[in-house]
Amino acid sequence: MVDLQELSIMVAAGTLIIGVISQIDTTRRGARTAERELETRQAQFFLQIYDNFHQADFFDKFTDILTWKWAGYEDFMLRYGRDANPRAWYSEASVAAFFEGVGVLVHRKLIDPEIVGELMSRHIVLFWEKMSPVSLEMRKRLQMPVDVWLENLYYVMKPIAEEQMKKAASLQQHQAPG
């Protein structure tokens, strides 16, 4: 038979176990809430960046750059270099700096690469593929890390852009008449 002392020990142990379970549950819920809050803050932060991305001035620069043509680094500098064409030089530097900044934020895990990829992967891919010969040559000549985070961002975004293209092609096949 259980005496009063044993009963009080069992009640105390049961209370302790319930308290520990409750604390673990509270900690888990708190961690999930903190994770959701972080995701929300990241999304809000990225949307502020994305707002700048969709300004007419940025898109004018971006689309203009995509139409540029040159034959090698020297020709690029003669057509679009700082001394030859300050407006073009600033446009390219401005767009590159924007994507470089996004690259740093993705690298530091301050914004989710999937969010960036879903909204601007093709732009990053197009820009880097257009400008990489110039950036890489400039990196060699200046012996400086020119557009390093932009290049890194490109390698993060390229698979996302390719997956988007596959999904788009699949959707087109399903929507094709007949």
Image (tube, rainbow, N blue to C red):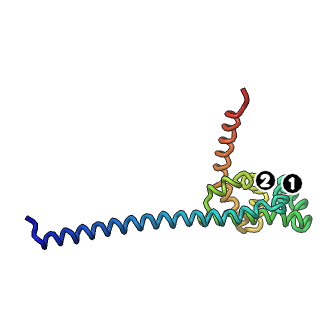
Q: In the figure, 123 relative to 15: above or below?
A: above
- According to the picture, the residue beneath numbered tag 2 turns out to be 130
- Looking at marks 2 and 1 on the same chain, the residue that comes earlier in the sequence is marked by 1
- Residue furthest out toward the front: 4
Q: In the figure, 99 relative to 9: above or below?
A: above
* Picture quadrant where residue 18 is located: bottom left
* Picture quadrant where residue 19 is located: bottom left
Q: Position of residue 91 (x, y in %)?
A: 84, 64
Whether residue 139 is visible to the viewer of this picture, yes or no, is no
| Residue at 13% over, 73% down | 5
Q: Are marks 2 and 1 in contact (CB under 8 Å)?
A: yes
Q: Position of residue 112 (x, y in %)?
A: 61, 60
Q: Position of residue 22 (x, y in %)?
A: 35, 67
Q: CA distance from mark 2 to mark 1?
A: 9 Å
| Disc 1: CA contacts within 10 A as few (<14), some (14-19) or many (>=20) | few
- According to the picture, the residue beneath numbered tag 1 turns out to be 68
Label 1 amino acid? Trp
| Residue at 67% over, 33% down | 174
- Residue furthest out toward the top: 178
Mark 1 residue element: loop
Q: Position of residue 177 (x, y in %)?
A: 73, 29
Label 2 amino acid? Lys
- Residue furthest out toward the right: 84
Q: In the figure, 128 relative to 33: above or below?
A: above
Q: Nearer the viewer, residue 53 or 145?
A: 53
Q: Nearer the viewer, residue 111 or 17?
A: 17
